[in-house]
Structures are given as C-alpha cells and as structure tokens.
Amino acid sequence: MAASLTLSVVIVTYGREQVLIDTIEQLLPQIDQTAGALELLVIDQTADHLPETQAALSQWAEHHQIRWLRLPEPQLTHAMNLGLLEAKGEVVLYVDDDIRPQPNLLQNHLAVYDRKPEVWAVVGQVIQPGEQPEALSYQPKGGFLFRYMDFPFRSTIPGYIENAMAGNLSVRRSRALELGGFDEQFIPPVAARFESEFAKRLVRAGGRIWFEPSASIHHLAAPSGGIRSRGSHLSSALPIFGIGDYYFALRQGRGWERFWYILRKPFREVRTRFHLRHPWWIPPKLLGEVRAFIGALRLYRAGPKLLDRSSSGRRSWPS
C-alpha cells in the first residue's frame, strides 16, 4: 500500500568523510524505492572536506540527488531545526551520518504514521557496535523525568515510549514546528540529552511517540568526527560533556525528581570501571560536573531557544 504522507530524510553531519559517503550511498536507493520519499537533505557543518568527499557531495547535489546545505560552524540543534524548516515532506526523518540502514527503513517509518494517526514521532531501532537485536520487555520506572531514560533501543518489541534517539527519529513536521523544534540552548559541541528534552516536551504537549523496531539502523560510532573530536568525557574537566544533561533536568524535571536527578549525576559519572582503575581522574571529572551545572543553570535562567511556533515556511539558505 502506498504511503499517504510525504517524507524528507535529513542527515546532520560534522567532520565525517568516507563514512558519510557510505551512508548516503545506502540511503539513496531507499529514497528512490519508497513511495512518498521526496528528498535527502544533508546539513553539513564541516568547514573543509577531503577532495574525494567534496567531489561526491558536489556531484550528488548537481544531479539533484541530495540537497546540500552548509553551515559556517557546528551547532547540532540549530542544524536539526534548519532541516525541519527546509524539509518539503510532511514527515521528517533524521538519521546519523555514520549508519548502515536496514531494508525498508523509510517505508517502515512512514507506515507507522498511516497506521497510528495519534503518533507525533517515531523512533526506530538503533543497534550500537557490539549489540544484537533482542526481545527486551520494558517497564518504565520512576516519575516523568526518569521514565524511559534507560529504554533499550535495540529491542525488537514495539510500543509507546517517552524518549528518543536522534540518529533514527522521525517527526510530523507540523507538530514539531508547533513545539518549537529542538531547543538551541543545547550548546555545541556536545548537545547531550537534546532529543530526550524534545521527547519529554512532545509528551507534555499531548503527543505520542512510537518505538518501531522494524525501522532499524546499525550505528557505526565512527571514531572521528562528531562529538568524539573533543576527546573523552571520562578524563575531562570540561563542562561541555555534562551541561546538556543538567539543562535537560532543569527544563523537564519537577520538584524532588529534578533535585534527585541533578544530585545523583556527578556520582553516576565517576562510578565507572575507568575511574576505578584511574582514580586520579575523579577530581577533574567532578570539577567538570560542577562547572556543567553552573553553565546549565545560566542557560535555564535565560529560557529555551525555540523556533517561532507559528513558523511553517522555509528559510532560504546558501548552498
């Protein structure tokens, strides 16, 4: 059965080369074969590509196989919002730039919206390196802030959830615009928890999120590019690795649950095998957590940075 909705696929990329080319090469045939699939947008935050990457992207763009939009500096949630504004489809599917999409990824995302009109967003299965799909039942625990934060996205059991992974996330464009898109207060270079904040905000607004394991990707976790270009969070006193998590709790938490989430986070960060073997990294890490909370508090007091909720048009952008 042909899908009744149209689809735009968006890749936000930063610092990727061959793995980005591989990802696009695997997605283009699915766009050609999926009824309703209109386009592949590449939101590129990389200043300078290798010549072979530049050539491949240029050729695809010239032949209208991709829309290649370039940004002068990396800001993940801003790039996500640009994709939302520029998309022509009624459904926008975000995928990571280092994935191996499984067959019928696009078709299976669209099928949920036809089958479940109450759904505002769909999260597909994400298989991380070393993982296998498993029939993992899940019972949410805790209050609104904690529920589904430990959801196993490798599960093969579909159902309604209250969390998201942006590497395999589709949204109804109109609903996402009503919500204001993604909060651009999740500052670069690490926007941890931005998709969880979006998911919780969506649920608070009365929307529903469906987990669809048949819409599956293998995440390759490429060793270069992305947030990995800023080193390891385990041995850093930088606040960038924790600020998004604290900001998420401040934005979506309430009462004692917010307090408990924030209080336990520093201890959770240093209760690792790495810190057991390298205890001299515990003080720098805790210092980074303090700095992260102070930074998140400043962002929270400034308020969220969302799209104009009345926006339904598209901004032109130089390519």
Image: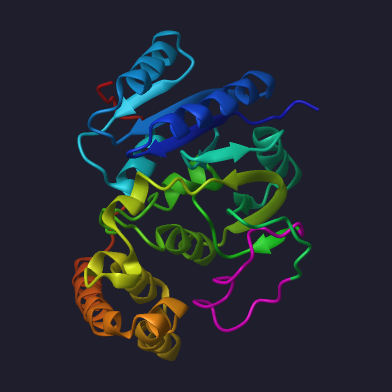
- Quarter occupied by the N terminus: top right
| Scheme of colours in the image | rainbow
Judged left or right of residue 251, residue 63 is right
Q: Residue at x 29, y 36 (%)?
A: 45
- Most extreme residue toward the front is 277
Q: Residue at x 41, y 84 (%)?
A: 276
Is residue 246 a member of the stretch shown in magenta?
no
- Quarter occupied by the C terminus: top left
Q: Is residue 258 above or below residue 126?
A: below
Q: Is residue 114 above or below residue 66?
A: below
Residue segment shown in magenta:
138-157
Q: Position of residue 171 (x, y in %)?
A: 54, 45
Query: Can see residue 130?
Result: yes
- Which image quarter: residue 268? bottom left
Q: Position of residue 86 (x, y in %)?
A: 39, 30
* Front residue of 210 and 97: 97
Looking at the rendered structure, the number of numbered marks drawn on it comes to 0
Which secondary structure dominates the residues rendered in magenta?
A: loop
Query: Can see residue 87?
Result: no
